[in-house]
Image (tube, rainbow, N blue to C red):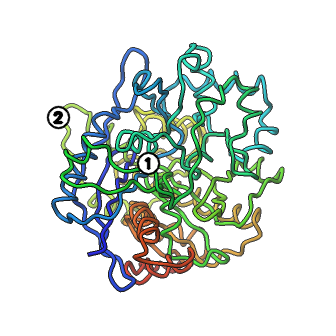
Amino acid sequence: MNAVAAVDLGATSGRVIVGRFADGSLDMTTVGRFPNAPVTTPSGLHWDLIALYRGALDGLAAAFRDEPGIASIGVDSWAVDYALMRGDRMLGTPFHYRDERTARGVEAVHADVPFAELYRRNGLQFLPFNTLYQLACEREEGMLDLADAMLLVPDLFGWMLTGERVAERTNASTTGLLDVRTKNWDTDLATRLGVPERILPRLVDPGERVGDLLPHVARELGGSAPVVAVGSHDTASAVLAVPMRADRAAYISCGTWGLVGVETETPVLTDAAREANFTNEGGVDGRTRFLHNVMGLWLLSETIREWEREPGAEKVNLPALLAQAAEVRTPVGIFDANDPVFMPPGDMPGRIATWLREHDQPVPATRAEFARSIVESLAEAFAGAVRTASELSGIPVETIHIVGGGSLNTLLCQLTADRAGVPVEAGPVEATAIGNLLIQGRTAGFVSGDLEALRAVVAEAFPPTRYAPRA
């Protein structure tokens, strides 16, 4: 059997999925799932990456038991976060991008390099947690003087598996330190910001071999296979797996975040794109992901988390809640899902209520109305971002593809179609893992072709659900 294994790390959980290729088709089996629970310490909010690695190892061991002939392993995760290394040691526990320290980094970076210049160089929208802002905090604390490498999360896992230190290019594009035109490290910018060139690893592209499993890893897993670079930024893998015509469609990779945009051959670096806060991130095969970050299902999950913290609270049944939200007939308040006030964790219902009250919008009286307000606000933000992406890129959007967990939210899909005025095609749910598997499959020779050919495999194996806009 032609099989590969994907380690897919999300902001709330991780999974290991075995993909099997036969006659140009793809079949998937999830062999491991594990939680991703950040930890707050006196120094701030951190990722528990050792626990995540343990979960990944257990999942890979299950993969080798299930399919001993696995041809390769690929790792993807969220972007921007990293570990600083000195030799074979991590210098502390990596910070979470939602940690409040990043505000200091923004001020320090913009004092040296104005944002307009940054955009010309790296093409990234302003997000206060981009890697270069985090590294400015490390510089102030003296940590960069100690480090000899910076490894983004999927590259850190690759190092733990193989001992090789690299930076996969699609994820490196989210750091703010990659030249948006040459797609190489911008060492001049790094020097200006006090980031030592020595900590920037060798860049690799999706499909390149990273290295073989270390002997002790192979023994633990009960098998051996090379680690292959994939679109290691999860959105890069997800966009690869969108069954779209890139010259006629927009995508929304919807999970904790909603990544809304189009795929282009070259970056869009106009003043209008900068003012609209659109980003140009690296895609597979040299494409550009021209997109805007919308807060995403974080708004709903953090609201539910707050409700479940109440004394005597029971676990919220999400499908039932969304069914009740779909039945709400009274007008609900629409809030700005992009407002930074919603970024940190904690009391999301209170913050939403305050925002609505301050903007003379009706405040939800029930949980169903809260959920409807959140979904309506997300649909409005998604539709607006699609319109802007189309205007800025010149791509006429005839269809919106929603992939990831949000594709299961029928209310969100329908409301997005309604507000955008174009059909929505929903699915696949596991787009990130599918993109990861497809790159490995192409590298191994199990499938072939360009992105359009790979997307045809996705459309055949995972037919989308269509939502027509209602009047």
Question: Which of the image's four quarters has the N terminus?
Answer: bottom left
Instruction: Identify residue for label 2.
Output: 312
For this view, does 383 lie left or right of residue 376? right
Image location of residue 182, percent across then percent down: 74, 51
Instruction: Identify residue for label 1.
Output: 77
310 or 286, which is in the foreground?
Answer: 286
Q: Is residue 450 above or below residue 354?
A: below
Q: Amino acid at mark 2?
A: Gly
| First of labels 2, 1 by sequence position | 1
Q: Residue at x 57, y 62 (%)?
A: 284
215 or 26, which is in the foreground?
Answer: 215
Answer yes or no: do the residues labelled 2 and 1 have beta carbons within 8 Å? no
Q: Residue at x 44, y 21 (%)?
A: 91
| CA distance for labels 2 and 1 | 35 Å
Image location of residue 421, percent across then percent down: 61, 74
For this view, does 31 lie left or right of residue 471? left
Q: Amino acid at mark 1?
A: Ser
Question: Which of the image's four quarters has the C terminus?
Answer: bottom right
- Label 2 or label 1, whichever lies nearer to me, is 1
Image location of residue 327, percent across then percent down: 36, 65
Q: Quadrant of residue 145?
A: top right
Q: Secondary structure at mark 1?
A: loop
Q: Give the label on residue 34, or none.
A: none
116 or 82, which is in the foreground?
Answer: 82
336 or 243, which is in the foreground?
Answer: 243
Q: Is residue 376 above or below residue 20?
A: above
Could you classify mark 2 by the number of other residues whose Cα lies within 10 Å: few (under 14), some (14-19), or many (20 or more)?
few
Q: Quadrant of residue 191?
A: top right
Could you classify mark 1 by the number of other residues whose Cα lies within 10 Å: few (under 14), some (14-19), or many (20 or more)?
many
Q: Secondary structure at mark 2?
A: loop
Image location of residue 66, percent across then percent down: 17, 64
For this view, does 40 lie left or right of residue 181? left
